[in-house]
Each structure stands twice: as structure tokens, then as C-alpha cells.
């Protein structure tokens, strides 16, 4: 399989995973489920960027993926802190 074929398969798998994560983000059922789905979507976006960087041979995109990964991590930590402190009741009634 050529490099173009491999990247096409990887992009297809990432798109499928992104759609499944979006369904979990939309349906819930609770706030922690949505936070995990949003974190997964950010991680998948890093995967998209990294795959694109490999496909095009542009190392600049790896820096962009690293920045996105760090911002996503900080966002997840902030959400976890918010949930732990009880900012809002996340349990389904």
C-alpha cells in the first residue's frame, strides 16, 4: 500500500471516530461524558493535523498539533476542576 493509500485509510478512520465522538458529545447523557467526548475530539484533531503533516511533509504542522494538544489538556483539566468543585449538578434527573 502506498503512502497516499495509508493516509487515506487513516483519514477515514479519524473521520469515523470523530463522528462517533460527536454523537457522544451531542447525546450525553451527563456532563462528564460530554467532557470526555470533547477531549477525544480534540485528540482526534491532533491526529488529523499530524497525519496531514506526514502526508505533506510539512514539519510546521507538528508544532500546531502540539499546541492544540496542550490547550486541549488544559481545557480538560479546567472542566475536571469545575465538575469536582460542584459548579453545576451534572447528574441526570
Image: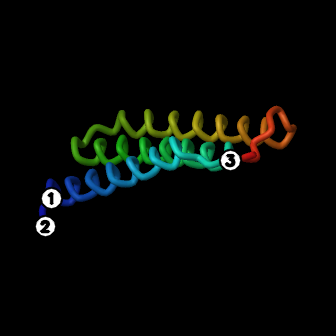
The quadrant in which residue 38 appears is top right
Q: Residue at x 51, y 49 (%)?
A: 24
Side of 11 where 62 appears, left or right: right
Q: Residues within 10 Å of mark 1 (few under 14, many from 20)?
A: few
* Mark 1 vs mark 3: in front: 3
Secondary structure under badge 2? Answer: loop
Q: Residue at x 28, y 43 (%)?
A: 52
Read off the residue under disc 2.
1
CA gap, disc 3 and disc 2: 40 Å
- The residue at which mark 1 appears reads as 5
Image coordinates for residue 60, horizontal then vertical, percent: 36, 33
Q: CA distance from mark 1 to mark 2?
A: 6 Å
| Element carrying mark 1 | helix
Question: Residue under circle 3?
Answer: 32
Q: Position of residue 31 (x, y in %)?
A: 67, 43
Query: Where's the N terminus, which quadrant?
Result: bottom left
Amino acid at each position: 500500500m502506498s503512502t497516499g493509500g495509508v493516509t487515506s485509510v487513516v483519514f477515514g478512520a479519524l473521520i469515523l471516530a470523530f463522528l462517533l465522538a460527536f454523537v457522544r458529545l451531542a447525546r450525553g447523557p451527563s456532563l462528564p461524558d460530554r467532557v470526555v467526548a470533547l477531549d477525544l475530539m480534540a485528540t482526534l484533531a491532533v491526529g488529523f493535523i499530524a497525519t496531514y503533516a506526514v502526508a505533506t511533509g510539512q514539519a510546521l504542522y507538528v508544532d500546531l498539533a502540539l499546541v492544540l494538544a496542550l490547550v486541549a489538556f488544559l481545557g480538560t483539566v479546567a472542566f475536571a476542576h469545575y465538575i469536582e468543585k460542584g459548579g453545576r449538578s451534572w447528574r441526570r434527573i
